[in-house]
Amino acid sequence: MAQKPSIPKGTRDFMPEEAIRRNYIFTTIQSVFEKYGYQPIETPAMENLSTLLGKYGEEGDKLLFKILNSGDFTQKVDSQAWEDKDALRLGTQVSEKGLRYDLTVPFARFVVQHQNELVFPFKRFQMQPVWRADRPQKGRYREFYQCDADVIGSQSLLNELELLQIIDEVFGRLGLKVLIKVNHRKLLSALAELMGAPDKLIDLTVAIDKLDKIGLPSVLEELRSKGITDEAIASLLPVLELKGSNTDKLKVLADLFESIPVGRDGVEEVRELLRYLESVAIQTEVELDLSLARGLNYYTGIIIEVKSLEVEMGSITGGGRYDDLTGIFGLSGMSGVGISFGADRIYDVLLQLNRFPAQHLHRTQILLVNFGGDDALYALGIAQELRESGVPCEIYPDAAKLKKQMAYADKRSIPYVIIAGESERKEGKLTLKNLHDGSQQLLSVGELLSQFQA
RNA sequence: GUGAAUGUAGUUCAGUUGGUUAGAACGUUGGAUUGUGGUUCCAAAGGUCGCCGGUUCGAGUCCGGUCUUUCACCCCA
């Protein structure tokens, strides 16, 4: 059916059941954020393009959704750019706004813009959709929600610790087994330095990020193709083959980076974080993984990634420290650290594992049959009393056949039906039917309320 | 952005080497002595076969393009 309406690729509608389950994820995450003292903020779906461009690297710029200028957008187009087919220049001429790509950069803008109104260190959370013009795939959408918590204006590693605690608690409450991977940008920098190729940091991280996926030989091959010398690669080997406990790994790294200051810093910070971790006893395993290299180029300190241990899926939560994100917007010296829960992927994981709790507390408990006329008014009164007692109920809007009304209750999985027609009304009573076992009882309104009070 | 697969009623799918009015199941709607659902029986509605173009006497079926969905790469939540 070609005429059937549709939605843009990579976007989704959510049916009631899905929406309820998504809310369960959001409220779970939100309640943990609040428990640790994070405050909510919201920012607009669109930002000025100048705020977004250049913050996510060249790849990220290509994935930004741009909003066409309103009115006659051809006004500012210079014909030369058109003739040259210079998409980049044309783009900036016809579009000045874009949909946000994540919540972190808009947050940085927010902090700089409102710096005089905020109390630092500022802890905020934000749960809003973001948009990426990516090609959709499994677990990858063009519109998806991020649930971010960030602390800005504090360099303490206690913040990193707190974020790890939050991750632990969120996934604990959701009943998911996960692994937290931790790395440090400085360790990666030190690695590049060790190889004598500090300028190849990006190539290096991109390549070793794939270690899990394509294996060591292919990674080495890729490094070679990027023009990294065999000698340099050889110096990298002990790190790529790093094994054992976190402390073992740190020991090897400490030796390796003895003469590299950034490396020593990195080792020291990771060591300190792990020490803090011992004193709070979280359930989730935290693993130092040198192959963890998050793509975003603003991370400068600890980087964090969470993977499901039960379902094959990209990372479901990520984050890290960025020393100078606000610097781009003219406020330097503001260190921040944050994490982002990928609600949509968490949904997919919970769905695959069938881990959603059966929660129908808030669903309609009772359907009141509508017989029309005075009977409908009588039912209306009962409904009002039920609602005042906190029992969710609804009246069938039309005086349709009883059969139809019963079928409606059945399809909606409403557990009880109240049948109150002329005979019940004259007695001041009602018939309560349990749809699960089919039993019925004749009750007064008072008896009904006390039955549902518990 | 690169490479590949896919697309037929609301949904899941049939549809023979191209050949009359394109089928099933489930779902939907109505009915089976007009106050009783989930089971059963009967009936009906619902498709310009993703879209555009081409080959052919004839296309759901073959070819090209386009869009959608899915997968891998890139990147990422």
Image (cartoon, coloured by chain):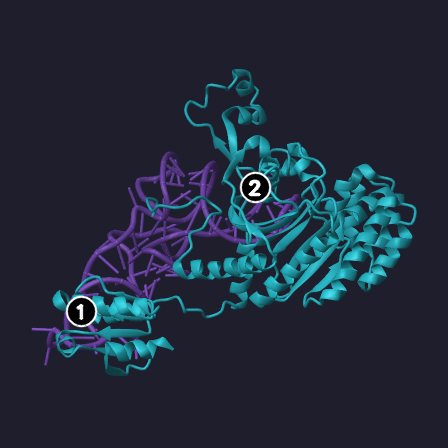
Q: Mark number for residue A101?
A: 2
Residue located 57% across and 20% down the image: A84
Considering depth in this image, is A124 or A358 the residue closer to the camera?
A124
Residue B7 pos. (x, y %): 41, 51
Residue A397 pos. (x, y %): 22, 61
Considering depth in this image, is A161 or A100 the residue closer to the camera?
A161
Label 1 is placed on what type of residue?
A: Tyr
The image quadrant that residue B10 belongs to is bottom left
Considering depth in this image, is A342 or A376 the residue closer to the camera?
A376
Chain letter of disc 1 in the image: A
Q: Residues within 10 Å of mark 2 (few under 14, many from 20)?
A: many
The image quadrant that residue B59 belongs to is top left
| Secondary-structure class at tag 1 | helix
Residue A382 pos. (x, y %): 24, 70
> Share a chain, discs 1 and 2?
yes
Q: Mark number for residue A216?
A: none
| Residue B34 relative to residue A133: left or right | left
Q: CA distance from mark 1 to mark 2?
A: 54 Å
Q: Mark number for residue A378?
A: 1
- Compared to residue A267, the image places residue A72 above or below, namely above
| Residue A348 relative to residue A3: left or right | right
Chain letter of disc 2 in the image: A
Q: Earlier in the sequence, mark 1 or mark 2?
A: 2
Q: Residues within 10 Å of mark 1 (few under 14, many from 20)?
A: many
Label 2 is placed on what type of residue?
A: Tyr
| Residue A142 relative to residue B40: left or right | right
The image quadrant that residue A105 belongs to is top right
Q: Colour of chain A?
A: cyan
